[in-house]
Structures are given as C-alpha cells and as structure tokens.
Image (cartoon, rainbow, N blue to C red):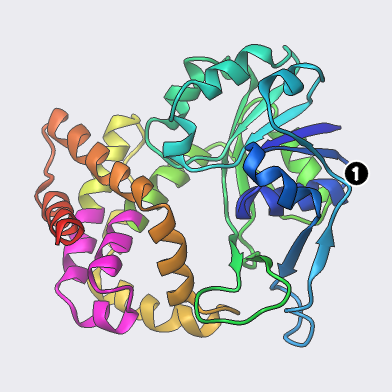
Amino acid sequence: MNILLVGAGAVGQVYGYHLQKGGAKVTFMVRERYAEACREGLNLYPLNRSAKSRWTATRFEDFDLLTSTEEVAAQAWDQVWLCMSSTALRRGTWFKELACVLGEETTLVLLQPGLHDQQFALSSWPVERLVTGLISFVSFQAPLPGETIEPEGVAYYLPPMSPSLFQGPQAGQVVGALKKGGCPGKVSSDTRKSMTQGSSVLMPHLIALELSNWSFSSLQKSPNLKSASLASKEAIAISMTHNNFTPSMLSALVQPLTMKMLLGVAPMVMPFDLENYLKYHFSKVGDQTRDFISTIIKLGKGLELPVSNLTTLEAALIAQDNA
C-alpha cells in the first residue's frame, strides 16, 4: 500500500510510523524548509511503554519525502492523509491543486476537527473517496518547554480503549492499515458526530484554561470554568443543529463540578506534564481555537440559538490578545 501523509508534524509522524510498521510504503509531503531535517530520520517516544524505557528514542526512517505537487502527481497513491490544522488546510489553494493530481483510486483521509472542514474538502473531492478521522492520541514535540530530553523528537500517548475513529466508504482499509502497525483504530458510523461534540466541549474549556494562564488549579477556582461549561452547552446545541445530528445527552454531563474533578484527576494519570503540553500545543495552534469559536458563534446567530456565553468567552480572549 502506497500512502502519502501531507505534513510531518506530531500527528503525521505517529500515523506514518504505525502505517510503516504495518507494511505500507510511507511518503511525507512537506515544505522544502522542513525536508532536510526529515531526511535525517525522526525520533519517536511511545509513552505507553514502561517508565524505564519511555524516554528512549525509537528511530523512524526509510520513508520518502516530496516537496511539490508535481512530485505527488508522478505516483499512484492508495491513501493520502491530511495531517495539519484546520486553518492550514483552508489556507491558500494548495489543497485544490493537490486534489487535481490525485488518481481516481485514491482515498483521502481528513483529520481536521473544524465544523466546515468536511464541506471544504468535498468542494474539491468526491464523498465516495473521503474518510473522516478522529485523532484519539496525544502527541507533541519533546522536550516540552522547561524539560530536557535528548535527542529531540515526537512523544505520543495512546489512551487505553480509545481507538482513532474513521468513517467513510473506505474506512475499513484505513483502520486495517493502522491496526497492522499496532495503532488502535475503529470504523464508526458517527465519527463526525463524536468529533463535533468533542470540539464543542474542548474548545471553550481550552479558552477558559488560556484565560487562567494555562493553570488547572487557577481554572478550578475561576468563574471561567462555569462560563466554559455553559459555552460548551451552547456549542453542542449549535453544532448538533447545524449538522442535523440527533440530540445528545453529552450536554447534561458538562457541568463545572464534573470538569473540576477531571482537572484534578487528568494530570495524575497522564505519563507527561499535561498542563505544559496544553499550553505548548494549543498556543501554537491558537488560530484554530479562535476560528472555532468565531465560527460557532456565527452559526448560532444564524440558527437563532443562544450564544451569550460563547460571546463572553470570545470577548475575554480578544481582550487578552489585545492587552
């Protein structure tokens, strides 16, 4: 199986590594300025291993690299995985140009969580050859700020009983390729619903955490936690209505007390510094968080649904950005 991954960041490297372990021929498409570093090979830190071997680097090599659409056009691809943020996916014309050179037998794997990402992809790609995926693992460039790890690489953690979910006509082939390489995956009929609900809960709480200086203890004591819970309920209602999904019970579970308990437990069960990771990663992709909340507010107003708590969070974030 010949697989192209567009983007060799923390997500692309993890999927590429496991696809290669499963026997696939893996190629990354990257910008020219990143190509040289990739040619030297990559270091991965699978954090599911024992504490003794957790920070011993695993080498990831023997993949190919491309830097142009013309190079992509010269080969036939079974699968093309899009491994970048929502905003990067929709920036410029590169995706339309890429879609034009891919063969009719290619399956496109869309991993972006934005509300309009699938619609954007379908403007240039047929639905019968699209698979949407929900990333279930945590991955990041190691070391995180303030840490010391040699050599530098990508650390990742596969949470137990949380496979990556995939939906679409060729989802079984995508899942099969991953599972051969030891990465949990599952075909699902409601991946888009799970992704939409997850983003609706996660994004408001990330904003509240950023407003609390990325400190769990500060957020637990802050009125931002209640605002985030109420904003999540609004976001769930808007996204469910917009996508014509059946009503969800998740909204009833998103309560300040529940989230406060999760904030206390999560750092103790993760094999890495969760606060540090969230600050590092979501500061880097902060444009995606801001894009989400502005989009969901606009949709809510168009649907004449409540957005007051979302608007309050966005206003506080804008004020902090401008301070």
Image quarter of the C terminus:
bottom left
Observer-nearest residue: 144 or 270?
A: 144
Would you call the spot at circle 1 few (<14 residues within 10 Å), some (14-19), or many (20 or more)? Answer: some
* Left or right placement of residue 119 versus residue 294 in this view: right
Which residue is located at x 36 percent, y 53 percent? Answer: 286
Position of residue 130 relative to residue 14, above or below, is above
Query: Which secondary structure dominates the residues rendered in magenta?
Result: helix
Q: Quadrant of residue 205?
A: bottom left
Position of residue 260 relative to residue 28, above or below, is below
Q: Which residue is mark 1?
A: 23
Which residue is located at x 54 percent, y 17 percent? Answer: 96
Image quarter of the N terminus:
top right
The boundaries of the magenta stretch are: 203-232
Observer-nearest residue: 23 or 99?
A: 99
* Left or right placement of residue 163 versus residue 255 in this view: right
Looking at the image, can residue 257 be seen? Answer: yes
Q: Quadrant of residue 49?
A: bottom right
Residue 290 position in % (x across, y down): 29, 47
Circle 1: residue type? Gly
Which residue is located at x 74 percent, y 23 percent? Answer: 72
Q: What secondary structure is marked by label 1? A: loop
79 in the magenta segment: no
Which residue is located at x 82 percent, y 67 percent? Answer: 58
Observer-nearest residue: 266 or 212?
A: 212
* Left or right placement of residue 215 versus residue 58 in this view: left
Residue 83 position in % (x across, y down): 60, 41
